[in-house]
Amino acid sequence: MAVVPDAELAVAARALRQSVVRLARRLRTQRQDHGVSPLGVSVLARLHRHHSLTPRVIAEGEHVAPQTLTRVLATLEERGLVLRSGDPSDGRQSLLEITPAGLEVLREDSVRREAWLAGAMANALTPAEQGIVAIAAELLDRLADE
């Protein structure tokens, strides 16, 4: 595999950052008005993927301060979107799980944005480019976990 020189990597990183920011802005315009903050939706998605997590693990995964997450979790609990229970392995900890209502908000949030994105991909990209975007999505996920 060819090694990309630092200057070229910096240019590629800048272009990628700008593209991701533009796409994220565009996707935000397609959101449903469900009253859940972007961080709240991200927490719901994380809980959906991992079933149950402690608030600390969620804060670390979302790269936010625990105090910031505390307010978001309180709002999600008040709306019945997440359920808090004691951790059976450590009584000092609590575990959070997404509720059916939380799953519905997550579904509503995704449907419209994914429909717009699929349409945009169908209109703007060739089938080969669509395949490249699918591969790039996997790579971007790996970068997000770094």
Image (tube, rainbow, N blue to C red):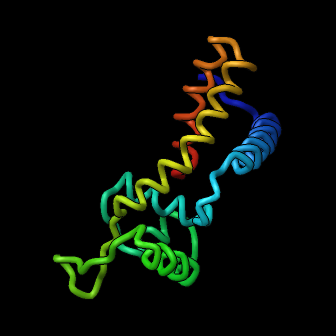
Residue that extends furthest to the bottom in the rendered view of this protein: 92
User: Quick check: 37 left or right of 106?
Assistant: right
Which residue is rendered at x = 54% and y = 41% of the image?
A: 111
Residue 137 position, x and y percent, is: 57, 34
Which quadrant holds residue 110?
top right
* Quadrant showing the N terminus: top right
Q: 33 or 25: nearer the eye?
A: 33
Residue 40 position, x and y percent, is: 54, 66
Q: 132 or 106: nearer the eye?
A: 106
User: Quick check: 121 left or right of 60?
Assistant: right
Which residue is rendered at x = 66% and y = 34% of the image?
A: 116
Residue that extends furthest to the left in the rendered view of this protein: 88
Q: 113 or 133: nearer the eye?
A: 113
Residue 39 position, x and y percent, is: 58, 65
Vertical position of residue 34 compared to residue 109: above or below? below
Vertical position of residue 116 compared to residue 29: above or below? above
Q: 127 or 30: nearer the eye?
A: 30
Number of numbered callouts drawn: 0
Vertical position of residue 77 compared to residue 109: above or below? below
Which residue is rendered at x = 74% and y = 41% of the image?
A: 23
Residue 16 position, x and y percent, is: 75, 39
Which quadrant holds residue 37?
bottom right
Residue that extends furthest to the top in the rendered view of this protein: 127
Which residue is rendered at x = 56% and y = 26% of the image?
A: 134
